[in-house]
Image: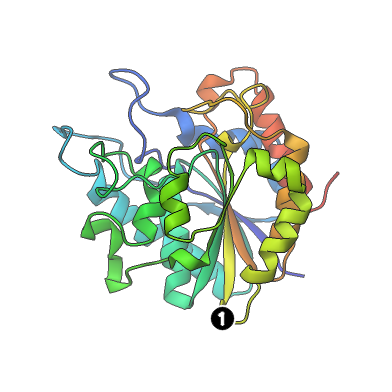
Amino acid sequence: MRNIVVLDAPSNLGLRPPAPGTVPGCYKLAGALREQRIVRRLGALEGGVVVPPRYDRGDWQEGDGVFNAAAIASYTRRLADRIENHVRAGDLPVVLGGDCSIQLGASLALRRIGRFGLAAVDGSADFRHPGNSERIGAAGGEELALATGRGQEDLTNLEGLKPYLRDEDIRLFGIRDYDTERDELAALKIPVVTVGELREWGAEGVARAALQSLEHPHLSGFWVHLDADCLDPSVMPAVDSPDPDGLLPAELLALLRPLVRSPRCAGLNVTIYDPDLDPEGVAGAVLADVVVGAFGEA
């Protein structure tokens, strides 16, 4: 049995301000899930926190590339150091974000070790890059593109390890059926299963089918990325983009369980939930229940 280690990565560097003069509240995600006793319920060890730089876009303007890029690059290296140490020690890190740009820390860490895959459960593909959009800026909506080498060099080629992920080693689950990036992903042969397809085929069956490739000998393992916006706004309104027609908690749980319980799973990160948008903590409780339930507690 591996030790589960809970590590906080409370970075909001990859999101646009929700309103002028404010900062994204997803940096409070880790604290909110800890209030739900997630560490004790997981039977986890304490991994501490990787403190992010200050959120400050300075004089950034549209067209300047990714904002907070230098800070994200620095933070990615430091987070990667911590994740790498845990994975090499045989632990299973559960990283509480944060916005989706923290996934770059996991991808860089695992790229240092070997060739790993990614099972991304996300309401959107986060595949915006200069080849398909002029609105580059928020790394939290671009992290999958950056991890596969699409975008500016100061984020895609840290330590000369570009790309951190190969297209063929990625599996995407839970994007909306109307997602506009589906055609590009299909052309790149990145497997995608939408919400509608998950319901048609069965979430657990989809996960077990994906494991047949993610557990292949050519991979040293795989990471699981969980973005809370994969859930439907009826149960998870506390995200920056609460798009309709998402997964329900039981569906997400059925998908996650086989993935995180695989001996080849290297770790999990949780992102985007914003406690500022959930003053009673109801959505946070749902998210904590799903994460804990995936590892074992009913």
Examine the rendering and report whether any part of residue 62 can be seen: yes
Instruction: From the top left corner, tell me how far across and down residue 132 is, in percent.
Output: 29, 45
Q: Residue at x 49, y 67 (%)?
A: 168
- In the figure, residue 197 lies in which quadrant? top right
Q: Does 125 appear above or below 264?
A: above
Quarter of the rendering occupied by the C terminus: top right
Q: How many marks?
A: 1
Q: Residues within 10 Å of mark 1 (few under 14, many from 20)?
A: few
Q: Nearer the viewer, residue 272 or 147?
A: 147
Q: Residue at x 64, y 64 (%)?
A: 92
Q: Nearer the viewer, residue 37 or 188?
A: 188
Q: Nearer the viewer, residue 81 or 286?
A: 286
Q: Residue furthest right?
A: 298
The residue at which mark 1 appears reads as: 218
Q: Does 211 appear above or below 287?
A: below
Instruction: From the top left corner, tell me how far across and down residue 152 is, in percent.
Output: 22, 55
Is residue 262 left or right of 140 when viewed as pictured? Answer: right
The kind of residue tagged 1 is: His
Q: Residue at x 43, y 68 (%)?
A: 166
Examine the rendering and report whether any part of residue 43 can be seen: no
Instruction: From the top left corner, tell me how far across and down residue 54 is, in percent.
Output: 30, 39
